[in-house]
Image: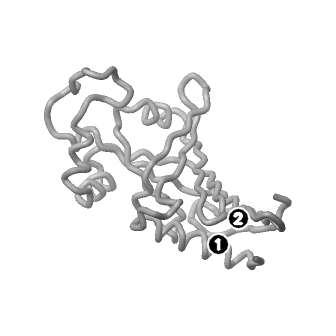
Amino acid sequence: MTLRLDEIDSDCWNALENAVKDLESGFHFLTVASVDQQGKPQARTMVLRNVDRMHRTLQIHTDMRSPKWQALGSNQDVTVLGYSNKTQLRLQGTAELHVAHSKVAANAWQRLSRRTQKTYAGAAPGSDIGTSPNEVGNPENNFGVLLIRISLLDWCWLARENNQRALLQYNVAGTLTSCKWVNP
């Protein structure tokens, strides 16, 4: 398989957009890696909720009481990893944190099912089993949105023979500024 660099850009963003609704896509559940407040690397699987191709952003939801939210408040640099159909995507970028009841979070909250909304009513992530919620009330108060602005897309097609890899860079406006083939 040989693609042109512009096809890789388009195909990757198509796959990410499709993964939002396709629960079977390998890109629906992504690994998000960051550095915690002690300087240790952390990685966790998260659900891809929305994609904005024009601005090169991925939207992911989280509980604002989680340690990752606190860590991302200090260091917004992230790497997102996905794998599907012999294609690995490593996306580097920065996370914008949108707190509960902000415009972005409120819009995202309205699109969630009631079942998913209820998951934000429990005890804080990482707390001991049997711990009661810090406050009984509106689960929306715990809901935050991560908008991850992608600056580098590292595409790698993994095959028995002829592995291929390309790097695509984007500016803050989401415009593709450079792309090149590199050794896998």
Question: Cβ–Cβ below 8 Å for labels 2 and 1?
Answer: yes
Mark 1 residue element: helix
Q: Name the residue under label 2.
A: 168
121 to the left or right of 95: left
Residue lying farthest to the front in this orientation: 160
Q: Quadrant of the C terminus?
A: bottom right
At x 49%, y 37%, the residue is 72
Camera-side residue of 150 and 129: 129
x, y (%) of residue 54?
51, 71
Residue 131 vertical placement versus 143 (above, below): above
Q: Quadrant of the N terminus?
A: bottom right
Amino acid type of the residue tagged 2 in the rendering: Leu
At x 60%, y 47%, the residue is 79
Amino acid type of the residue tagged 1 in the rendering: Asp
Residue lying farthest to the left in this orientation: 137
Residue 86 vertical placement versus 121 (above, below): below
Q: Name the residue under label 1.
A: 9
134 to the left or right of 179: left
Mark 2 residue element: strand
x, y (%) of residue 169?
69, 62
Q: Residues within 10 Å of mark 1 (few under 14, many from 20)?
A: some
Q: Residues within 10 Å of mark 2 (few under 14, many from 20)?
A: many
178 to the left or right of 19: right
